[in-house]
């Protein structure tokens, strides 16, 4: 085994230097905020704080980078086969087109709401743009196809809620990720049609928990246990980036896997961790493991690997959109479980064997030209994972530089959001969004390391916001968390928004609330139960009792709140573009149903507590009334609510209309029984404009 591991390490160390040149139009060698020209001479990086595309001389980092103004909040950049550069401007609802050598954008394409994904056909004739939502429908996003010669729209097709990234595949196919839904959609790009609206990912991730058999018919069982009761599945969330192998036979998606295990949000709760009810995966304990007093993670006695409640993962699919993943519900972090039937694919979980160096927040993904290694930029742990795409070993390594399956972790700057591998196979580039820097990675002395760092710009945001953002997204700050755990505020509040996940806790099911655009500092008390009267109490409990940190200082608390208050709500065209007569009708329905009785004031909440008929009374996880200190649940702010579904504390309302219709005839949530069907639609239109 030692010889095999050494061979794996040597193969990894030469991955950058020995990769063959990518085929024309292929390689899938970059994603996110950084890309490289076709001849490897120029590096392009987009800075969302500065609304700028930087052009950097790859051979001479001492040279002054060229700065090109693009649209508002650029987040994605792509280089086409003819070296045209495309920039997706997330809050500009546009794509900037920049020709090589130009000092400004040659034109701007109007697209949908929050464009977040880009791809160009191998022949360079078609540009594909993924929009988070359409301008006319906030509940469905789309893919647009543009003719790159005429810049005219070929087609637009709806693909599902909150799509994020796209990769092209052989045979006129494409895969699109659904960010919060945790699934993928298949497209026929020759026709602009959805051919498969979902996958078998959840089933394949949870075969043991669901009682399914392996492909050879044998039942699966969690290693080292005799079974558990209660929720024990994992669900994919935050599907941020996708790429395909050069031959198109495998597709890799960077994601989080969030647990459905019951979390003990109150460390002294006697019903948690075997004290009266079966609660697998309690607060700090994984299924089959005893819980500890703090930590959103799971490990066993003496085990160095910790699996957080939302773990960084690398999902694998075949080109037809079928999941090819390990059984996450059978995973044991102490054994770095690898399914013996897995075949040749990367490990499911992104890990680091180095104590105190977690892997969290996968934000961008690229594959080298050989197809042998996947590079993942991890925004919250400030590092890059380099993962073999084949099964090197079925046991975790002991090398400090290698994680399970031969993965290497390389530290870079703050908040990496883009990764690109040069076509000559010698260099990888990383853009670090939180310190506006470009990292150059290359191999030497057997290990890939950060060799050079180029600062492209200085901070333009207020100092408290800059510092607060780094704290919010940090999985490595001992003040915010236990670095061995590997979790940050953004692990659940992805992008400082919400992850669409309902967490099972000993208090009951709890939907992650959105933080952006809510005037959070003005809406005390905090949490669904309202048990925290001040921001300081709220932050102390979260960072100490849940995330295992020392707790932020008063200065850090101010910085965190400054950042949270600065983040814009999701782009919503209905806020400014809803016709006046529609708003007027909706406001009349709002008044008729007495919505303003509770949803009032600047933040559209009275900060009080009510039972509106949504408490969960049956099932494996119920709302425990002893924790409803005020007799009900905290009234949520309705500011910017339109794109924050699912709704309610248990996520039981997938849409705003569904929420209004729940208990409508019983007037459980306002005087809704008297609303006509048209008034319900008018009320929905009004609420989504808030």
Image (cartoon, grey):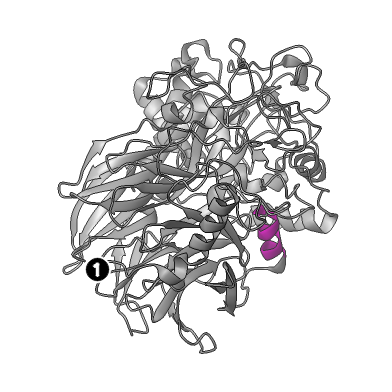
Identify which residue is drawn at 19% across, 46% down. Answer: 192
Mark 1 surroundings within 10 Å by alpha-carbon count, few (fewer than 14), some (14 through 19), many (20 or more): few
Q: Main secondary structure of the magenta part?
A: helix
Q: Residue furthest bottom?
A: 63
Q: How many marks?
A: 1
What residue span does the magenta drawing correspond to? 464-473
Q: Nearer the viewer, residue 557 or 659?
A: 557
Badge 1 is on which residue? 24
Q: Secondary structure at mark 1?
A: loop
Taking 585 as reference, is 379 left or right?
Answer: right
Q: Nearer the viewer, residue 124 or 110?
A: 124
Q: Is residue 39 visible?
A: yes
Identify which residue is drawn at 72% across, 64% down. Answer: 464
Taking 69 as reference, is 261 left or right?
Answer: right
Taking 415 as reference, is 113 left or right?
Answer: left
Q: Could you tell me residue 485's position as x and y percent?
A: 70, 44
Query: Residue 593 magenta-drawn?
Result: no
Q: Nearer the viewer, residue 217 or 349?
A: 217
Q: Could you tell me residue 376's position as x and y percent?
A: 50, 56
Identify which residue is drawn at 54% across, 26% down. Answer: 233
Q: Could you tell me residue 451's position as x and y percent?
A: 58, 76
Identify which residue is drawn at 42% across, 59% down. Answer: 366
Query: Measured along the vertical axis of the image, is residue 612 above or below residue 685?
Result: above
Query: Measured along the vertical axis of the image, is residue 73 above or below residue 308?
Result: below
Q: Could you tell me residue 346's position as x and y percent?
A: 46, 46
């Amino acid at each position: 085994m030692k010889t095999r591991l050494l061979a794996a390490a040597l193969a990894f160390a030469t991955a950058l230097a020995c990769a063959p040149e990518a085929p024309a139009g292929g390689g899938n060698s970059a994603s996110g905020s950084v890309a490289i020209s076709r001849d490897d001479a120029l590096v392009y990086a987009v800075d969302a704080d500065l609304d700028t595309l930087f052009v950097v001389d790859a051979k001479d980092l001492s040279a002054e980078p060229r700065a090109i103004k693009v649209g508002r909040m650029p987040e994605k950049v792509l280089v086409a086969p003819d070296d045209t550069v495309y920039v997706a401007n997330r809050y500009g609802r546009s794509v900037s087109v920049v020709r090589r050598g130009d000092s400004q954008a040659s034109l701007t394409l109007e697209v949908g709401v929050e464009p977040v994904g880009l791809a160009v056909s191998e022949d360079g004739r078609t540009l594909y743009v993924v929009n988070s939502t359409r301008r006319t429908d906030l509940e469905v996003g789309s893919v647009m196809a543009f003719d790159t010669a005429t810049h005219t729209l070929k087609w637009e097709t709806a693909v599902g809620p909150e799509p994020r990234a796209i990769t092209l595949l052989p045979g006129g196919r494409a895969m699109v990720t659904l960010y919060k839904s945790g699934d993928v959609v298949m497209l026929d790009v020759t026709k602009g049609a959805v051919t498969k609206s979902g996958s078998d990912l959840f089933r394949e991730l949870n075969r043991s928990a669901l009682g399914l058999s392996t492909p050879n018919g044998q039942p699966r069982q969690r290693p080292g246990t005799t079974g558990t009761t209660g929720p024990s599945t994992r669900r994919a969330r935050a599907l941020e980036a996708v790429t395909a192998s050069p031959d198109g036979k495998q597709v890799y998606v960077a994601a989080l896997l969030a647990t459905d295990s019951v979390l003990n949000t109150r460390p002294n709760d006697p019903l948690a961790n075997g004290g009266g009810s079966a609660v697998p995966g309690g607060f700090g304990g994984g299924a089959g493991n005893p819980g500890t007093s703090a930590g959103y993670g799971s490990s066993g006695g003496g085990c160095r690997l910790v699996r957080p409640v939302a773990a960084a993962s690398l999902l694998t699919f075949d080109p037809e959109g079928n999941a090819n993943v390990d059984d996450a519900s059978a995973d044991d972090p102490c054994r770095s479980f690898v399914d013996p039937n897995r075949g040749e694919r990367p490990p499911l979980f992104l890990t680091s064997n180095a104590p105190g160096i977690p892997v969290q927040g996968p934000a961008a993904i690229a594959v080298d030209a050989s197809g042998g290694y996947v590079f993942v930029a991890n925004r919250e742990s400030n590092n890059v994972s380099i993962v073999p795409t084949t099964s090197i070993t079925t046991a975790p390594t002991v090398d400090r530089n290698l994680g399970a399956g031969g993965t290497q972790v390389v530290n870079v700057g703050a908040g990496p959001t883009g990764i690109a591998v040069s076509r000559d196979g010698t260099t990888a580039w990383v853009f670090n969004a939180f310190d506006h820097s470009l990292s150059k990675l290359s191999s030497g002395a057997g290990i890939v390391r950060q060799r050079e760092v180029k600062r492209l710009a200085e901070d333009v945001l207020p100092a408290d916001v800059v510092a607060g953002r780094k704290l919010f997204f940090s999985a490595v700050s001992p003040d915010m968390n236990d670095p061995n755990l590997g979790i940050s505020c953004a692990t659940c509040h992805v992008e400082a928004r919400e992850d669409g996940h309902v967490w099972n806790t000993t208090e009951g099911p709890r939907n992650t609330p959105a933080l952006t655009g809510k005037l959070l500092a003005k809406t005390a008390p905090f949490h669904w139960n309202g048990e925290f009267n001040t921001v300081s109490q709220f932050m102390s409990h979260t960072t100490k009792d849940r995330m295992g940190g020392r707790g932020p200082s008063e200065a850090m608390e101010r910085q965190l709140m400054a950042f949270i208050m600065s983040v814009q709500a999701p782009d919503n065209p209905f806020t400014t573009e809803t016709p006046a007569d529609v708003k007027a009708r909706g406001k009349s329905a709002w008044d008729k149903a007495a919505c303003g009785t509770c949803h009032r004031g600047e933040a559209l909440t009275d900060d009080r507590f009510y039972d509106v008929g949504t408490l969960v009374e049956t099932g494996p996880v119920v709302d425990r009334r002893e924790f409803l200190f005020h007799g009900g649940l905290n009234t949520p702010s309705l500011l910017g609510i339109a794109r924050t579904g699912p709704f309610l504390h248990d996520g039981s309302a997938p849409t705003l209309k569904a929420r209004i219709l729940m208990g409508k005839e019983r007037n459980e949530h306002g005087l809704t029984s008297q609303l006509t069907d048209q008034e319900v639609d008018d009320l929905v239109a009004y609420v989504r404009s808030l």
